[in-house]
Image: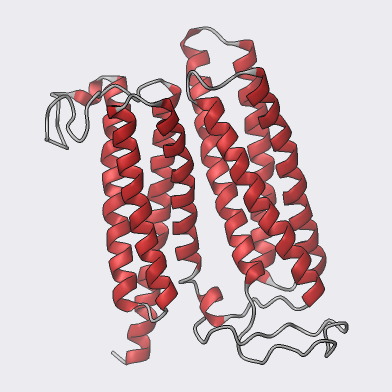
């Protein structure tokens, strides 16, 4: 097999593996949402053992038949699998990727997944709701790191064929995209405060979260309008803008439905199932929305590296694409 063909295959398989890790992490986040929604976080009050057993697969006979055990221990199993996938991805990146900063990013992903495991364990040992909320927030940062790693191995990123064509418009898109990342993450933090028993559904947190939802709508619409108006010929930016808009709309609808369902406090098994389904869906779509905002920010932040940066006043006012020599690696 020619070296070029082999190299292309390596990028393709690593991209697929990275995408699988992202999908598995979404599954883990959704499972964690179920644990919180049904109050099963302390079903196993010990760690790293499970009811005194070091048997990770089967700590208790037929544990999967007990909903609380299934939720909590299932979460531990999926987290272990995500950890293994992350270590493999980081090792693969370190071995094959020529970009030093990318190898460091793989190491950061491993550090985050280890930190997540420790936070989850200490949350159990210390019976700490504060750590549970920190655990939820760090999970989103870990997810965003994996999303970024996946973007960085795509053909679009490596070919640098999505360069933003105008300096002023690109700066506008960067500002809106960066604002979206910050506002969405703050909204995630507020959501964590609301979801964990003993901290949430106070009038103050609820008001802040609802207000934050409108702030998210504003920054996402701002980024979308700039992308559609000025970068409709840049496919990667345009697709991301539409994905961001769609995730925002779905997230707003899910949040409204969850709030109404919580306020009306439906009785019966059907109401409980509907509440769990809505809140978990809201959590997962929130992660997707955050990931999309990170992708948009990274795309907007890119600068081409094949030409020198323009001198002050040399073409900037005429909309000539900005050029930079910042680094030799794509």
Q: Is residue 244 left or right of residue 283?
A: right
Q: Looking at the image, can residue 80 be seen?
A: yes
Between 141 and 28, the residue placed more toward the observer is 141
Residue drawn where x is 85% and y is 87% of the image: 313
Say which quarter of the image contains residue 29: top left
Q: Is residue 107 left or right of residue 294?
A: left
Between 252 and 102, the residue placed more toward the observer is 102
| Residue found at the far right of this picture | 317
The image shows residue 20 at horizontal and vertical percentages of 38, 56
Residue drawn where x is 75% and y is 38% of the image: 214
Question: 202 above or below 224?
Answer: above
Q: Is residue 321 left or right of residue 94?
A: right
Between 158 and 271, the residue placed more toward the observer is 158
For the N terminus, the image quarter is bottom left
Question: 177 above or below 100?
Answer: above
Residue drawn where x is 13% and y is 24% of the image: 61
The image shows residue 50 at horizontal and vertical percentages of 18, 29
Q: Is residue 116 left or right of residue 247?
A: left
Count of numbered circles in the view: 0
Q: Looking at the image, can residue 231 be seen?
A: no
The image shows residue 27 at horizontal and vertical percentages of 40, 42
Residue drawn where x is 75% and y is 78% of the image: 165
The image shows residue 271 at horizontal and vertical percentages of 53, 14
| Residue found at the far top of this picture | 267
Between 47 and 238, the residue placed more toward the observer is 47
Q: How is the image coloured?
A: secondary structure
């Amino acid at each position: 097999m020619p070296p070029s063909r082999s190299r292309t295959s390596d990028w393709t398989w690593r991209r697929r593996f990275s995408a699988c890790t992202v999908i598995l992490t979404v599954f883990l986040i959704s499972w964690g949402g179920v644990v919180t929604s049904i109050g099963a976080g302390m079903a196993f009050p010990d760690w790293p053992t499970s009811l005194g057993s070091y048997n990770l697969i089967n700590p208790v006979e037929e544990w999967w038949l007990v909903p609380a055990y299934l939720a909590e221990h299932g979460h531990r199993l999926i987290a272990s699998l995500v950890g293994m996938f992350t270590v493999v991805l980081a090792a693969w990146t370190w071995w094959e990727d020529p970009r030093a900063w990318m190898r460091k990013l793989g190491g950061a992903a491993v550090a985050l997944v280890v930190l997540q495991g420790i936070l989850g364990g200490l949350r159990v040992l210390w019976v700490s709701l504060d750590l549970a909320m920190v655990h939820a927030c760090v999970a989103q940062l870990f997810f965003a790191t994996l999303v970024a790693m996946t973007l960085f191995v795509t053909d679009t990123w490596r070919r640098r064929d999505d360069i933003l064509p105008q300096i002023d418009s690109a700066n506008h898109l960067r500002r809106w995209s960066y604002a979206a990342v910050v506002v969405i993450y703050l909204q995630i933090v507020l959501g964590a405060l609301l979801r964990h028993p003993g901290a949430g559904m106070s009038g103050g947190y609820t008001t802040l979260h609802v207000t934050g939802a409108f702030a998210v709508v504003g920054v996402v619409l701002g980024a979308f309008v700039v992308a559609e108006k000025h970068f409709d010929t840049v496919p990667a930016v345009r697709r991301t803008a539409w994905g961001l808009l769609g995730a925002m709309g779905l997230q707003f609808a899910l949040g409204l439905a969850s709030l109404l369902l919580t306020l009306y406090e439906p009785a019966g098994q059907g109401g409980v199932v509907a509440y769990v389904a809505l809140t978990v869906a809201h959590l997962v779509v929130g992660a997707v929305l955050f990931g999309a905002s990170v992708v948009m920010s990274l795309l907007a932040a890119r600068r081409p590296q094949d030409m020198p940066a323009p001198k002050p006043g040399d073409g900037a006012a005429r909309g000539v694409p900005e050029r930079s020599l910042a680094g030799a690696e794509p």
